[in-house]
Amino acid sequence: MTSSRYRGSLAVWALLIAYASLYPFVPLRLPSMEAVLGYFSRPRYVTAFDVTVNVLAYAPLGTLACLYLRQAGATARAIVKATACCAAFSFAMEFLQLFVVGRVASMYDTLANAAGALWGALVFADPFYSLVTRPLGERREQLIVPGAWGDAGLALVMLWMIAQLNPALPFFGAGNISGAGADPGDLVALQWAAVAASIWGFGLFVSSLLRGEHGTLRTTLVLLSVALWLKFVAATFMLQPHFAEEWLSVGRVLGLIAGIAMLVPSRRFGRAVRIYLALMLVLAGALFSKIVGSYSPLDDFLRLFRWPYGQLASFATLTRFIHEAWPFMALVFLIALFLRVRREPVP
């Protein structure tokens, strides 16, 4: 394994943090002296929620940075360097926030981010590394296709899970739930077909990441169950009461059942056939979802939430972007993987 293998995952997570840190990007301003001095002073409000979010956001960055750096040096040195690099990145994000109207830079955020990065990097320190991290890494090499291809697929699964944290987005659908209260009668069948194709394609996408054909159904069901649980919990705590259950309509339930039923026999196909079929189904599901999807302006979209904390707009827009872009990122991955598999010599 080389350090270059992990550059992509590290860059993706850094870009996600940069988006969340700098949204809405404009309008820009020249920072006043008061704003600069405010960075070094204690904020008026320091909430446990904001600190927790900062720590959790930077923990994966610390893990990925340490994973990248430890390939070329000692683990202890990699942990220190990863934490220092993540702290410098956090400081850069806070510094740039001084130029964005509506954002407030704080030294406390930088410290929380650095603490999260250190926490993430320490997964490579013993005894945690020997007890948890190394066995997980060995298990990953046993189950998932090796090298950068498996890493890229796992990164896409991670992005898909992040999108599920937004309960205002329909489960395997386009748009948001503002128009999901009453499914138009002439579009129910199309919505059913869109979800079924997406679920089926997602299951075959998962199968493309596994070394063998066994375990596809079990892994897919686990991922779908976790996603449904995330949606349910997030909807309960984040959405207005009358919107709490609209992310999962009758059409989506039927599509979910049908997609899983069609996955059962198709997971036995050859690897190239499964990848090609996943490509077609993900594309079809995305196109059908666009047809029946309902989109709201950002202000109306944000009114769906009962979010008592800050940064709602950055969370909502980032997760909606990932939600909309995921099928097309998966398509690029599947096309490249299909071409690679086709070039492999037949044993």
Image (spheres, rainbow, N blue to C red):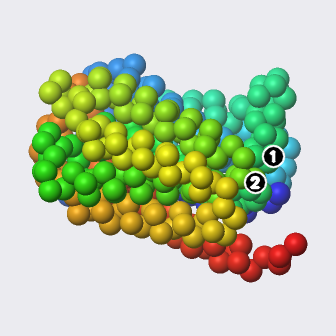
**Label 2 packing within 10 angstroms: few (<14), some (14-19), many (20+):** some
Identify the residue under disc 2: 211
Q: Position of residue 269 (x, y in %)?
A: 66, 61
Residues tagged 1 and 2 counted as in contact (Cβ below 8 A): yes
Q: Within the image, what quadrant is residue 240 found in?
A: top left
Q: Residue at x 87, y 72 (%)?
A: 347
Q: Nearer the viewer, residue 42 or 323?
A: 323
The relative height of residue 347 versus residue 289 in the rendered view (above or below) is: below
Q: Nearer the viewer, residue 184 or 20?
A: 184
Q: Position of residue 160 (x, y in %)?
A: 47, 48
Res. 273 in view: yes
Disc 1 is placed on an element classified as: helix
Q: Residue at x 60, y 52 (%)?
A: 265
Q: Within the image, what quadrant is residue 254 found in?
A: top left
| Residue at the limit of the structure toward the top, as seen here | 48
Identify the residue under disc 1: 142
Q: Position of residue 80 (x, y in %)?
A: 72, 39
Disc 2 is placed on an element classified as: loop
Q: Amino acid at mark 1?
A: Gln
The relative height of residue 170 versus residue 113 in the rendered view (above or below) is: below
